[in-house]
Image (cartoon, rainbow, N blue to C red):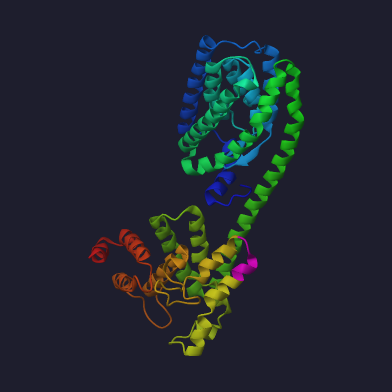
Amino acid sequence: MTSPDDPRVEALLRAAPIRQAEPLSRRDRLAESGLAVVLLGVIAAFAVWAPAPATSTAMLALLLGGVYAVARRVEFSVGDCTASPTLIAVFPMLVLLHPAVALASIVCGTLVSRGDEYFRRETHPDHVLLAFGDAWYAVGPALVIALAGGEVSLAHAPVYLAAFVTLVITDNVTSSLRMWLALGVAPDVQLRLNAIASAIDAALAPIGLALALVARERPMAVLMALPLLALLAALGREREQRIQHALKLSEAYRGTALLMGEMLEADDPYTGGEHSQGVLALALEVGHEIGLDPRDQRELEFGALLHDIGKLRVPDEILNKPGKLDPAEWAVMKRHPADGQAMLDRIGGVLADVGLVVRGHHERWDGGGYPDGLVGEEIPLPARIICVCDAYSAMTTDRPYRKAMPVEHAMTELRACAGTQFDPAVVEAVERVARRSAPPRLSTLLAA
């Protein structure tokens, strides 16, 4: 993932710098404190139980801890967290050092890598606790290698492979649990983000193993990792620039959508004001009711805001005509979905995708709509939602040629057209939303 194409990921990326400078929440602090205490217990248990390999020396621990601290400085933004190429140091740590020393070195290396950020107050002191939670991914592979024992050799490749698989599983489980406890991030989102870290680890694991094989005889060989880390640091900075560009572009799309909505309101206060805002509010509630994913929900939001943007090309004498339109005028009016898509296509990016929703918001479930005569699920789901919400809003607000219809009458009309003009599932969702927001007596009438 090189861009925040999922609104949930975009939100995490935007929140990351703010969260880094703020203290941990009470729930987060309790969870991270618990993880720290348990990890200290695990380190103590390893110290008592696990044998020390002959290669585990203080000098090698310092060297690997330093390389690890440098690797931690190389960051690839992944949602609210960062992925770093630390496995280039972690794998030699797990293979060459006593497991207790390896885990302690990971914690200390993490703290050292953040020292300047704490000094400059870019990172809140509370985040010291995160260094312990960040080391938990190494517990599983440390146990696998400790149980296998033996000298460092390619003959133990199956053990190292098992350790790597255990590392990936441990990392995914612990990071998903931590992000869920701290921020309520859905596990599926975090697992998708973790795929980047897992890919980096998979690429670096063989290099880390090769470094361990050389360093068992020549400890200074671990410093050969530094040029590679310098290269990865340059790539990480380039990726961060692309992400920041994508975030600014997303802000520009949202600003453009809002500006176009204001233009529509200035041109036609009803279409761009009361009507569009009513459709937007109802559509977003219905989208949540149906369970749209965040990307579709964003398209629904922009589509509802801009569904009538093509009316900017409709002459005012047609748009505001108090009576029925004649065939020629109706032909002009029916062009507004395609005109709206054309306008959004010229902007491109996210709004080009929204253009498909705008184009489809006057299609009918039975294929009798316009401009393309799409049938059923051929119509984008956000467009089907806007179609029903647009009709409901039109019926329940005053128009130039008639007064607003009572809500219960509007719902009766929607039910009558379900399966022909409207998607029946969307009509049911609109009814559930309307029933919840209606006064008690009206809710009874709607349920009847």
Please state the horizontal and vertical placement of residue 381, each as a whole percent of the image.
45, 63
Task: From the image, give the main secondary structure of the stretch colored magenta.
Answer: helix
| Position of the C terminus by quadrant | bottom left
Identify the residue at image location x=36%, y=79%: 403
Please state the horizontal and vertical placement of residue 213, each as a whole percent of the image.
69, 21
Residue sitting nearer the eye, 316 or 95:
95
Q: Decide if residue 109 is in sight here.
A: no
Q: Decide if residue 265 is in sight here.
A: yes
Q: Is residue 73 left or right of residue 132?
A: right
Identify the residue at image location x=58%, y=36%: 198
Magenta segment boundaries in residue numbering: 343-349
Q: Is residue 319 left or right of residue 433?
A: right
Image quadrant assignment for residue 208: top right
363 is higher (above) or lower (below) than 130: below
Magenta-colored stretch includes residue 434: no
119 is higher (above) or lower (below) than 1: above
Please state the horizontal and vertical placement of residue 288, each as a whole percent of the image.
41, 55
Q: How many marks?
A: 0
Image quadrant assignment for residue 123: top right
Instruction: Specify the farthest residue to the front.
Output: 155
Image quadrant assignment for residue 377: bottom left
Identify the residue at image location x=66%, y=48%: 244
Residue sitting nearer the eye, 150 or 171:
150
Residue sitting nearer the eye, 230 or 442:
230
327 is higher (above) or lower (below) than 335: below
Please state the horizontal and vertical placement of residue 441, each as a whole percent of the image.
24, 63
Residue sitting nearer the eye, 48 or 179:
48
